[in-house]
Image (cartoon, coloured by chain):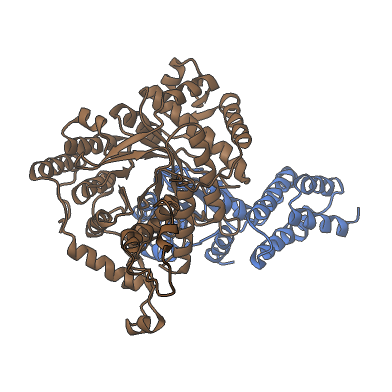
Chain colours: A brown, B blue
């Protein structure tokens, strides 16, 4: 049998990658990078790096960063809530998760963006649980019916209750890490068990150009020590917070992420870390950051290729759109992003469901995007030989009357070779008219309703639920909050 | 160089965003003992206005806009000591206290607005990013500002815009200092909801909004 090729997209030559990495190292050494966190500066100082505690500038030597890179695992394993299902984050594996931390939800009925509430977050988590091509969940929405001091931990609590999938999350405040980690440990049955089978990824963003804030640096350190993977989310905006050229933005991206890798490894050698990002092409007319721009996707594919060269798992914010409703733009930008990200072999792709520059989530879009992700998965699974010979035996005794439809070969392979969308329109014109000429968002909305009706929530067992609620309430009380919204 | 030539040169230098030329021509105007108010009104101001027109027509993008605004600022810095010496007060369109609200370190949008306000004849007191709400109010009182511009990029920090207005109300300063809000999550609806005097979605519109609230 001929081996199936895993189709791959590479935008940079080896020489180009080496040049970008060399320049990133040179900047880290000569110009240095700002790290506004005392503990990290201490770690760097102890590792023999030149640190200016007043300006928070640290000069990183290449040999230290290379040592840190060598200590970082090239593959991260994530486990679902049950601890049984394992996901490999590394190699060319691709896992999609909904774009995280949306501040609005697109109301399908009114087509207006509105503030999400707890019931939206519950429904969104349940929906994510149902979708086969969305492997991970994320703390997708911010519920505005809970007070902001507990907004980050609350999202995690809801996610852990209503979906078994591993979860991509992050902290809004330094103090939040502890209770968030406690929630995760409660599901696993202890800190050690959690480190052995991580259930969550913590996103941490440097502030471009070349700065790690106190909050995100602390998140890196805390996650490393808890054995939880951090995702480095560098986010240069071309010509606004990074150089205007794509290659220049890549140099800065690599420099920021390398510093993140060093912080993680100095905090705990061997801790899991993912080379990610959310950079964007900056719109020089409107001052916006289009995630659906081809240039944004090129930066993503470019740094992911460099992440692979550095032997790290990778992540990007792709398969999302800047459209404000579920229109054609929402589809084409998401489709392009999903396909490019999958071809680039990016391990974690955050974005499905998202609209309007990473600010708005749409349940209808999420189910449409699930189909898009399915198409991307199909593409990267490639063209397989399947049988040997491929065809000659099937043509033995061939006549004009030969029936392909009834061939055992057809029945054996048609579901493996082809996919059958639920939402995309493949009807004839007359059938489409007969079904009421429904636009895709309408069909998606019906599918959302059906999924939520037919898939009952898969909650953790009662003891775990009680423990999760206890941790949340203790943290809420510590912040002066005594009541939280009803969940159903 | 004749005065008309000089004024035309100044206008062109601003439009094309050539900083050293804009500064050199300012020095030349001083050397030639020209009426500096006239130099500003007939050279620099028409220049920056044309830049605004080119932006509105869609010919100019942010890099041109900001480069020209910075040229304007540099040239004004050359002229200012002379204006002070001669005790000439340039007509300010109004004084703004501007900053990005507490908890938010994003300052690109704020910088764009500050540059454009300043280039368009406003006095600008830039407090930077991650600014405490109290500081906006205190600085506005201290500098006798006309209005306060609050920038926020995050939805979590945009609440600071509301808090600022509440603080103004508490201190009986609401109305005394007008408030403009901006930043990715802000909107006219939000501005109305919290009782701000104006909202602008980009730096050019911020200038318009500022002119409007100053009654110009």
Q: Is residue A346 left or right of residue A100?
A: right
Residue A358 appears anywhere in the view: no
Q: Residue furthest left?
A: A462
A4 or A83, which lies in front? A4
Give the total number of marks visible in the rendering.
Answer: 0
> Which residue appears at 19% of the width and 40% of the height?
A475
A449 or A378, which lies in front? A378
- Rendering coords of residue A412 (x, y %): 31, 59
Residue B164 appears anywhere in the view: yes
Q: Is residue B125 left or right of residue A233?
A: right
Q: Residue furthest front?
A: A397
Quadrant housing residue A153: top left
Quadrant housing residue A113: bottom left
B104 or B79, which lies in front? B104
Vertical arrangement, residue B211 with respect to residue A60, above or below? below
Vertical arrangement, residue B124 with respect to residue B211, above or below? above
> Which residue appears at 45% of the width and 58% of the height?
A392
- Rendering coords of residue A298 (x, y %): 55, 49
Quadrant housing residue B208: bottom right
- Rendering coords of residue B45 (x, y %): 72, 59
């Amino acid at each position: 049998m001929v081996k199936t090729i895993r189709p791959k997209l590479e935008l940079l030559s080896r020489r180009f990658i080496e040049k970008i990495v060399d320049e990133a190292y040179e900047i880290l050494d000569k110009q240095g990078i700002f790290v506004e966190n005392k503990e990290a500066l201490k770690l760097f100082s102890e590792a023999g790096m030149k640190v200016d505690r007043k300006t928070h500038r640290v000069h990183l030597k290449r040999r230290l960063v290379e040592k840190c890179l060598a200590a970082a695992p090239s593959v991260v394993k994530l486990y679902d809530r049950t601890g049984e299902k394992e996901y490999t984050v590394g190699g060319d594996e691709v896992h999609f998760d909904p774009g995280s931390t949306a501040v609005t939800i697109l109301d399908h009925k009114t087509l207006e963006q509105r503030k999400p509430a707890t019931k939206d977050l519950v429904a969104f988590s349940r929906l994510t649980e149902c979708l086969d091509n969305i492997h991970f969940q994320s703390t997708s929405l911010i519920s505005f019916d809970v007070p902001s001091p507990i907004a980050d931990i609350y999202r995690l609590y809801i996610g852990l209750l209503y979906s078994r999938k591993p979860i991509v999350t992050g902290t809004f405040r330094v103090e939040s890490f502890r209770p968030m980690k406690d929630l995760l440990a409660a599901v696993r049955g202890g800190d050690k068990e959690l480190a052995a089978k991580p259930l969550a990824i913590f996103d941490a963003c440097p502030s471009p150009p070349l700065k790690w804030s106190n909050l995100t640096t602390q998140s890196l350190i805390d996650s490393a020590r808890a054995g939880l993977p951090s995702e480095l989310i560098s986010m240069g905006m071309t010509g606004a917070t990074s150089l205007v050229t794509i290659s220049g933005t890549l140099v800065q991206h690599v420099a920021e992420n390398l510093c993140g890798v060093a912080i993680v490894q100095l905090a705990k050698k061997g801790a899991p870390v993912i080379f990610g990002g959310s950079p964007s092409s900056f719109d020089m007319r409107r001052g916006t950051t289009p995630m659906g721009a081809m240039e944004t996707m090129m930066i993503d594919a470019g740094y992911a290729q460099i992440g692979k060269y550095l032997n790290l798992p990778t992540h990007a914010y792709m398969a999302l759109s800047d459209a404000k409703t579920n229109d054609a733009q929402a589809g084409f930008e998401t489709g392009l992003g999903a396909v490019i990200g999958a071809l680039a072999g990016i391990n974690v792709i955050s974005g499905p469901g998202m609209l309007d520059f990473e600010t708005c989530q749409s349940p209808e879009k999420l189910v449409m995007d699930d189909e898009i992700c399915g198409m991307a998965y199909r593409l990267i699974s490639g063209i397989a030989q399947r049988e040997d010979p491929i065809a000659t035996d099937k043509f033995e005794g061939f006549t004009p009357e030969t029936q392909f439809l009834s061939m055992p070969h057809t029945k054996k392979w048609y579901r493996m070779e082809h996919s059958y969308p639920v939402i995309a329109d493949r009807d004839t014109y007359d059938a489409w008219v007969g079904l009421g000429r429904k636009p895709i968002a309408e069909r998606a909305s019906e599918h959302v309703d059906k999924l939520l009706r037919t898939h009952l929530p898969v909650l953790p067992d009662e003891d775990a639920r009680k423990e999760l609620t206890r941790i949340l309430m203790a943290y809420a009380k510590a912040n002066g909050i005594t009541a939280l919204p009803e969940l159903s | 160089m004749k005065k008309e030539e000089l004024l035309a040169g100044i206008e062109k230098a601003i439009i094309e965003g050539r900083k050293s030329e804009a500064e050199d021509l300012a020095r030349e105007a001083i050397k030639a003992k020209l009426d500096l108010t006239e130099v500003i009104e007939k050279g620099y101001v028409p220049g920056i206005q044309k830049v605004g027109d080119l932006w509105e027509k869609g010919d100019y993008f942010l890099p041109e806009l900001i480069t020209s605004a910075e040229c304007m600022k540099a040239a004004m810095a050359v002229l200012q000591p002379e204006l002070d010496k001669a005790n000439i007060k340039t007509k300010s369109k109004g004084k703004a206290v501007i900053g990005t609200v507490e908890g938010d370190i994003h300052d690109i949008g704020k910088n764009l607005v500050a540059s454009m306000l300043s280039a368009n004849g406003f006095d600008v007191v830039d407090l930077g990013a991650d600014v405490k709400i109290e500081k906006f109010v205190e600085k506005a009182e201290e500098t006798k500002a006309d209005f306060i511009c609050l920038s926020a990029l995050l939805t979590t920090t945009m609440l600071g815009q509301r808090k600022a207005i509440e603080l103004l109300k508490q201190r009986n300063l609401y109305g005394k200092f007008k408030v403009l809000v901006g930043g990715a999550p802000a909107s006219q609806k939000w501005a109305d909801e919290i009782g701000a005097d104006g909202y602008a979605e980009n730096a050019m519109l911020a200038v318009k909004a500022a002119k409007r609230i100053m009654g110009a």
